[in-house]
Amino acid sequence: MFWSVISYQLSVISYQLSVISYQLSVIRCEFLVYRLLFTGYCLLLTAYCLLITVYCLLLTDHCLLITAY
């Protein structure tokens, strides 16, 4: 049960990070090149955080299944 709580909290944190990085990617910069680089970086960070979210949710399910037995 302890690990399932930790993995769920990690999934919540990584989801919040993905939302923040997506919001940062929407911010407009004055220079197009910088904006494109910044947007690309933030979108990669968003994708990475969403992958972590999925992994942590799967880990939570796995820990809950182990706890159920």
Image (cartoon, rainbow, N blue to C red):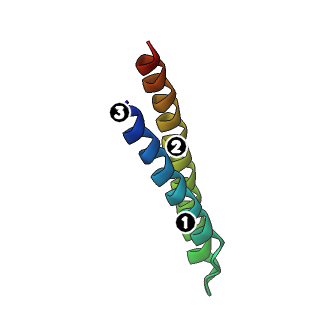
What SS does tag 1 mark?
A: helix
Location of residue 50 with respect to 27 vertically, above or below: above
Residue, disc 3: 3
Question: How far is the residue under mark 2 from the one under mark 1?
Answer: 14 Å
Q: Viewer-proximal residue, 1 or 43?
A: 1
Residue at the top extreme, as displayed: 69
Give the residue type at disc 2: Thr
Numbered label attached to residue 57: none
Residue 68: x and y in percent read 46, 17
C-alpha gap between disc 3 and disc 1: 26 Å
Q: Quadrant of the N terminus?
A: top left
What residue does disc 2 label? 53
Q: Residues within 10 Å of mark 2 (few under 14, many from 20)?
A: many
Q: Residues within 10 Å of mark 1 (few under 14, many from 20)?
A: some
In front here: 38 or 68? 68
User: Which percent across, then down, holds residue 66?
Assistant: 42, 17
Task: Tell me which amino acid carries mark 1.
Answer: Ile
Give the left or right position of residue 5, taking residue 20 as reference. left
Residue 65 at x, y percent in the picture? 48, 19
Q: Earlier in the sequence, mark 3 or mark 2?
A: 3
Side (left or right) of 66 relative to 54: left
Determine the residue positioned at 41% across, 33% down.
Answer: 4
* Up-down relation of residue 49 to residue 2 (above or below): below
Q: Could you tell which of marks 2 and 1 lies nearer the N-terminus? A: 1
Query: Could you tell me which secondary element the residue under label 2 belongs to?
Result: helix
Q: Which residue is disc 1 drawn over? A: 20
Considering the numbered disc 3 on the image, is that residue within a helix, a strand or a loop? helix
Tell me how far mark 3 sits from mark 2, CA to CA: 15 Å
Kind of residue at badge 3: Trp
